[in-house]
Image: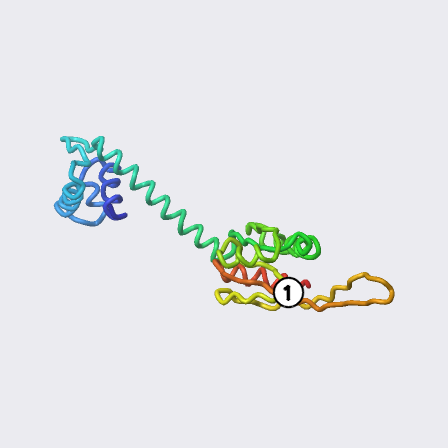
Amino acid sequence: MSQKELNYILKVLEEGSFSKAAEKLYISQPSLSEYIKRTEKRIGTPLLNRQANTVSLTEAGKIFVESERNIVRQRENTQRQINDLIHLDCGQVTIGVSVFRCKQFLTRIISIFKEKYPKVDVLIEEDVTENLVYYAEQSITDFSIVLLPTNIKSLNSVWLFDEKIVVAVAKTTTLSKIISYRFLLRARSPRLIFLCLKMIISYL
């Protein structure tokens, strides 16, 4: 049933007659009657009890109207969720990161992000680099922060920062290594992820 068909039936019930409903709907009574008869023919059973002084729903009509009302509510709820997501009133971002990296800088940045977007849920998947790459590839995470090199053609990478790691060894030996970190992206919500990435990079 279309929204129009549902509205016509509800108006007939509200007014208690086809003539009054037709007047309120700005159509002729024969047109309204024919419209509802076509609907009943398509459904395969009467939806309205037509009596001399009143109109009421049949048992099938009660079931059908309630079902269509639920569909309308679900459609409105779906549109509302989409609108919320577009305007970032709500949403979810899942970040893959090692336990160390999460404690080192991500926790602080997430707190700032949540202040700006309080209705956006930020979920963390903590694991080792090999698994984090897999999570990004399978869209388990929206992006993962991992070590280079990663040669996964199905993923896009965005350079984040270089980090110097100093290893403590004997006085006669020194060793340092530059390791690059990258985001691995498999975006499900590109705009939301972009904002999250932008904030992370700006606070590093």
Q: Residue at x 68, y 67 (%)?
A: 179
Q: Vertical placement of 140 versus 55: above or below?
A: below
* Towards the viewer: 120 or 97: 97
Task: Kindly tell me whether residue 19 is visible in this rendering.
Answer: no
Q: Amino acid at mark 1?
A: Tyr
Q: Write the residue at 52% across / 52% down.
A: 92
Residue 145: percent from left, percent from top: 61, 60
Q: Position of residue 46 (x, y in %)?
A: 16, 36
Query: Dividing the picture into quarters, in which one does residue 150 lie?
Result: bottom right
Label 1, on which residue?
181
* Quadrant into which the C terminus falls: bottom right
Horizontally, is 51 left or right of 164 in the view? left
Horizontal relation, residue 175 to residue 12: left or right = right
Q: Residue 3's x, y, as percent?
A: 27, 48
In this orientation, which residue lies closer to the viewer: 84 or 143? 143
Q: Residue at x 40, y 49 (%)?
A: 78
Residue at the spot 57% in from the left edge and 55% down from the top edge: 131
State left or right for residue 79 relative to residue 165.
left
Quarter of the rendering containing residue 200: bottom right
Residue 85: give x, y in percent of width and height: 48, 55
